[in-house]
Structure formats: C-alpha cells, structure tokens
Amino acid sequence: MTNTSSQADLQRCIDACSACADACDRCAVGCLREGEVNELARCIALDIDCAAACRFAAGVLARDSAMRNTVCAMCAMVCQACAAQCEMHPMDHCAACAKACRQCAAECDRMGLAAVRTARSAP
C-alpha cells in the first residue's frame, strides 16, 4: 500500500463507493419514474455523475493507485453535491441516495485524512 491506510480501511471505502454508486443508479431510475421528471433533472444528472465518480474511485482504490487520495477527494465532493440535491426531494429513493452519498463522502474523506497524517509524519 502507498500509505498507512490499512487493508480494512481501503475495503470499507471501496464498499461505501460501490454502495453509493448502486444507490445513485436506483435514485436516477426512481427520479425518471416520477411524474415531474423535468423538476428532477439536476438530481438525475448528479446521480449519474456520482455513480460514475464512485465506480472510478472504487477501481482506483482496488488498484491501490498513487492517485487514490486525489480521486477520493473528488469523489467526496461529488457525493456531497449529490447528497445535498437529493435531500431537497421527499422521495424514499432520494433519501436512501443522500444517506449513501454522505457515508461514501465520509469514507473518502477518511482516506484523504489518513494520507495527510502519513505525509506529516514522514521524515
């Protein structure tokens, strides 16, 4: 591994990213089935962006890429934006998506913080 994050930390973040991508896919489909799809266009777009970001991050983490901290930071930002958008809507699929996005953002942030601590402790 490229820093002091444990394999368990990596796997927890990969799992959160995968769960978030799935929740975003379900939310996008749920939004498309709602009566006022035009009002949900921003939510659908963010769901798609977030699912893609999460899948990319999960792959980067699985490969233990040197770019993982940068990718995790990007993923956390996209997840936060998606969560904020989903929280604006009352549907269950949006609530589930927002929860998964917040959890993924927290795990990705944790990966980034571990990298900062490692860099600060390096000689």
Image: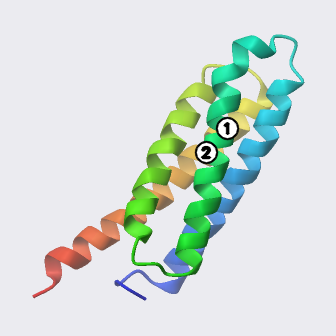
- Residue 72 is situated, as x and y percent measured from the top left of the image, at 45, 60
The crowding category of the residue bearing disc 1, from other C-alpha atoms within 10 Å (few below 14, some 14 to 19, many at least 20), is many
Q: Amino acid at mark 2?
A: Cys
**Residue beneath the point at 16% across and 81% down:** 121
CB of mark 1 within 8 Å of CB of mark 2? Answer: yes
- Residue 71 is situated, as x and y percent measured from the top left of the image, at 45, 61
Q: Amino acid at mark 1?
A: Asp
Residue 81 appears left or right of 48: left
Image quarter (top left, top right, bottom left or bottom right) of the N terminus: bottom left
Residue nearest the viewer, comparing 38 with 34: 38
Query: SS at mark 1?
Result: helix
- Residue 61 is situated, as x and y percent measured from the top left of the image, at 53, 74
- Residue 59 is situated, as x and y percent measured from the top left of the image, at 61, 71
**Residue beneath the point at 25% across and 68% down:** 116
**Residue beneath the point at 66% across and 31% down:** 45
Image quarter (top left, top right, bottom left or bottom right) of the C terminus: bottom left
Asked which quadrant contains residue 77, the reply is top left
Q: How many marks?
A: 2
Q: Say above or below: 89 vs 93.
A: above
Q: Say above or below: 59 vs 84.
A: below
Residue located beneath label 1 in the image: 47
| Residue that lies at the very extreme toward the left in this rendered image | 123
Asked which quadrant contains residue 39, the reply is top right
CA gap, disc 1 and disc 2 = 5 Å
**Residue beneath the point at 44% across and 70% down:** 68
Query: SS at mark 2?
Result: helix
Q: Say above or below: 70 vs 118.
A: above
Residue located beneath label 2 in the image: 50
